[in-house]
Image (tube, rainbow, N blue to C red):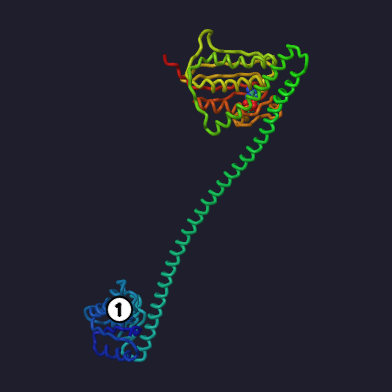
């Protein structure tokens, strides 16, 4: 029977054992008997009774020694012990309690008293066990729940981290989108500005051509006038051609179709050719040109794409003359380690430091109102930069508003092999 409790009665006198047992037997309680201290220890360890009735006065090992031994072992220390004492001996009773006993019963036994005390302590013992079991069940539940909570917590933490990562990713994507949008809007604005500009740039020489062609048809035209009209028509046509060439250049740069065609170049010849093309413009503006082309008679020769170098130089000289109303335009070059560094300096309107990067972007014209007055489609520096990079060099500038500018560019120095 699972729920039947067991009482161990220990006494060296058989009669006492029998009397005590008779008080308990028949009340749904198992009874085991032991007639010595040693036997009591062995039986306890084997059967784990729920209560021990322990005689004090026994030969060899008395009740106190038995009790002390049981209380010293973890498996038996919680089994309640009731001492059986011959007389109401206060000393014995006190010592018994001090050793951990829960009660005492005096001899001679009163059977009802024995039964009541045994039943009382058995119920206390049962209740204590139930409480202990409930406690350990509770503890187990708490441990399990804590483990579950820890796991849920970890999951939540990793979810939060994941969310944070996604949020950050979204934020960066959003920022990128905003930037891309701003760029798209800006490039749209620049394109509109460019179209307005370019139509103006095309219309001016076109009107010139149409006007002068009409004038050529006038009867009795003097040879001088005819000459000046045809010169004007040629100039306007060249301007038109230049715009068309720039647009073509930009489109081949964009489609990455621009190729480098190297040949032997005499630097001074190339520069002189370029500058001769600006003679008329320079004399109309009344500015002076200062060439610093090295010692007379010495001219650098190298291998590069002459057409592109000429274009870079033309664009920079064109700007320097265009944006300078008085003073001079100076240019020259220096041979440095492995590169030639060119410079084009002017005493013109200058460019504020914050705009130095912008001006290389296509269609970009800084100080628009001011530059608009000077004409141009905003493509020259974009082409100059792209060509410099194609040739393997760099381009940069030093300039301040109203203080003139110096544009520098380099190309690799590849000497001509003899
Ligand atoms: P643009 O056809 O307008 O001259 P560029 O690409 O050649 O186009 O130059 C871009 C802008 O850089 C110009 O509109 C002008 O504002 C500025 N810029 C270029 N060169 C000079 C210079 N030498 N002095 C002052 N401003 C310059």
187 relative position to 141: left or right? right
Residue 36 position (above or below residue 411): below
360 relative position to 40: left or right? right
Residue 290 position (above or below residue 359): above
On the image, numbered disc 1 is attached to which residue? 48
Q: Secondary structure at mark 1?
A: loop
Residue farthest top in this picture: 297
Quarter holding the N terminus is bottom left
The quarter of the picture where residue 104 lies is bottom left
Residue 102 position (above or below residue 232): below
Q: Is mark 1 within 8 Å of ligand 1?
A: no
The quarter of the picture where residue 245 lies is top right
x%, y% of residue 390? 51, 27
108 relative position to 408: left or right? left
Q: Nearer the viewer, residue 386 or 75?
A: 386
Q: Nearer the viewer, residue 100 or 370?
A: 370
x%, y% of residue 233? 69, 20
x%, y% of residue 405? 62, 22
């Amino acid at each position: 029977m699972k729920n039947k409790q067991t009482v161990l009665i220990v006494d060296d006198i058989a009669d006492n054992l029998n009397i005590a047992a008779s008080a308990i037997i028949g009340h749904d309680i198992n009874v085991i008997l032991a007639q010595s201290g040693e036997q009591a220890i062995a039986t306890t360890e084997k059967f784990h009774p729920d209560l021990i009735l322990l005689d004090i006065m026994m030969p060899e090992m008395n009740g106190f020694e038995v009790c002390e031994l049981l209380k010293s072992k973890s498996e038996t220390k919680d089994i309640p012990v009731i001492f059986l004492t011959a007389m109401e001996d206060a000393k014995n009773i006190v010592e018994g309690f001090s050793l951990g006993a829960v009660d005492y019963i005096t001899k001679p036994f009163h059977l009802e008293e024995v039964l009541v005390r045994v039943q009382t302590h058995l119920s206390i013992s049962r209740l204590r066990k139930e409480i202990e079991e409930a406690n350990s069940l509770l503890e187990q539940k708490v441990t399990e729940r804590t483990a579950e909570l820890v796991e849920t917590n970890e999951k939540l933490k990793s979810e939060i981290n994941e969310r944070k990562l996604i949020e950050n990713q979204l934020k960066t994507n959003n920022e990128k989108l905003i930037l891309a949008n701003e760029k798209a809007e800006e490039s749209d604005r620049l394109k509109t500005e460019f179209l307005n500009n370019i139509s103006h740039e095309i219309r001016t020489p076109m009107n010139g051509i149409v006007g002068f062609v009409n004038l050529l048809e006038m009867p009795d035209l003097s040879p001088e006038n005819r000459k000046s009209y045809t010169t004007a028509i040629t100039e306007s046509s060249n301007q038109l051609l230049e715009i068309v060439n720039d647009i073509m250049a930009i489109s081949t740069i964009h489609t990455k179709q621009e190729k480098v065609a190297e040949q032997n170049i005499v630097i001074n010849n190339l520069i002189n050719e370029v500058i001769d093309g600006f003679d008329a413009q320079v004399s109309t503006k009344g500015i002076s040109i200062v060439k610093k082309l090295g010692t007379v008679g010495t001219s650098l020769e190298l291998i590069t794409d002459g057409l592109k170098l000429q274009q870079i130089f033309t664009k920079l000289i064109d700007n320097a003359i265009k944006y300078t109303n008085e003073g001079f335009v100076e240019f020259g070059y220096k041979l440095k380690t492995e590169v030639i560094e060119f410079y084009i300096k002017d005493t013109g309107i200058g460019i504020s430091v914050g705009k130095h990067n912008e001006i290389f972007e296509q269609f970009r014209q800084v100080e628009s109102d001011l530059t608009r007055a000077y004409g141009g489609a905003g493509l020259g520096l974009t082409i100059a930069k792209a060509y410099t990079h194609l040739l393997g060099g760099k381009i940069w500038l030093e300039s301040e508003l109203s203080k003139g500018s110096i544009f520098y560019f380099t190309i690799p120095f590849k000497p001509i092999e003899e």
